[in-house]
Image: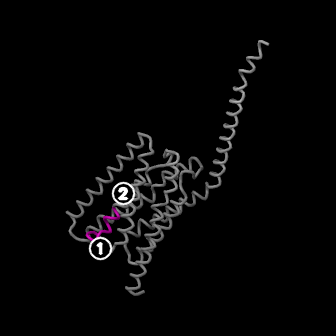
């Protein structure tokens, strides 16, 4: 493959990666619609969204021309990801109980302070693209793995409850597609800072999908049992209310 053909292929795969990553970032939308309708975050964890936010901020910095030139496709998708994740975190803050809200807000502020500090230090202390790429790229590896691994907390809940109710399938599926696309992108013009985290992310996403397949049927049974129990409780309540409404007639009839 010639250099020109490789560059075209890299651009095409990068665009595909942008599209898949876009789906990944937007995949929690059904989850947040449910949160909005119920007015509560329930057992959903903010960790994946906080991890994704800091990951996107670091990758946006990495893709800037002053840090790592010729990486505009890295900037476009991760810049969009920053905006999307901020919206999700804002919704989490609105619908969380007070104690959880304080924790989420504290982590959000710490992440903003971190990225501001990293930007200033990188641009003032490192004076070449190679050094800046190495510094920010190393952090990208760490935070990208965190983003992919963050659902591990939810996976623990899945194993404990034997239910995937709180591990959305589309997030895991989009993470898998995202990992494959960006690993391919990085291998065409080898970039270790993109290859390593996305290769590992692909493996973690596969683990999540296997876990989903393992507990999916059991989840359906648990939800069906919960629904049936709810129906029984409603019927029992109706019987109790019905008997209570006939009580005064019996009391009136007693003196006769």
- In the rendered structure, find residue 57 and report the number of the disc placed on it: none
Quadrant of the image for the C terminus?
top right
Q: Residues within 10 Å of mark 1 (few under 14, many from 20)?
A: few
Residue 51 to residue 103: above or below: below
Residue 240 in which image quadrant = top right
Residue 210 in which image quadrant = bottom right
Work out how far the residue at label 1 is from the one at label 2, CA to CA, in angstroms. Answer: 21 Å
Residue 104: x percent and y percent?
39, 47
- The residue beneath circle 2 is 54
Residue 191 to residue 249: above or below: below
Highlighted range, magenta: 58-67
Numbered disc 1: secondary structure: loop
- The residue beneath circle 1 is 69
Q: Main secondary structure of the magenta part?
A: helix
N-terminal of the pair, mark 1 or mark 2, is 2
Name which residue lies at 48% across and 55% down.
151
């Amino acid at each position: 493959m010639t250099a020109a053909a490789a560059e075209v292929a890299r651009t095409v795969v990068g665009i595909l990666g942008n599209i898949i990553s876009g789906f990944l970032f937007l995949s929690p939308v059904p989850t947040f619609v449910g949160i909005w309708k119920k007015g509560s975050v329930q057992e959903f964890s903010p960790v994946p969204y906080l991890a994704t936010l800091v990951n996107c901020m670091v990758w946006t910095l990495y893709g800037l021309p002053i840090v790592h030139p010729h990486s505009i496709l890295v900037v476009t998708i991760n810049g969009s990801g920053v905006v999307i994740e901020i919206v999700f975190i804002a919704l989490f803050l609105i619908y969380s109980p007070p104690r959880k809200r304080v924790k989420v807000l504290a982590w959000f502020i710490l992440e903003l302070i971190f990225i501001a500090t990293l930007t200033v230090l990188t641009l003032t202390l490192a004076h070449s693209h190679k050094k800046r790429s190495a510094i920010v790229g190393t952090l990208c590896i760490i935070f990208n793995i965190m983003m992919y691994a963050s659902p591990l907390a939810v996976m623990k809940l899945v194993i404990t409850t034997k239910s995937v109710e709180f591990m959305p399938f589309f997030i895991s599926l989009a993470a898998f597609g995202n990992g494959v696309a960006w690993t391919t992108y990085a291998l065409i013009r080898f970039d270790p800072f993109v290859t390593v985290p996305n290769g590992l992310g692909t493996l973690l996403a596969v683990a999540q999908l296997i876990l989903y397949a393992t507990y999916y049927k059991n989840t359906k049974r648990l939800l069906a049992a919960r629904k049936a129990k709810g129906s029984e409780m409603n019927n029992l309540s109706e019987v109790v209310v019905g008997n209570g409404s006939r009580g005064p007639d019996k009391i009136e009839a007693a003196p006769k």
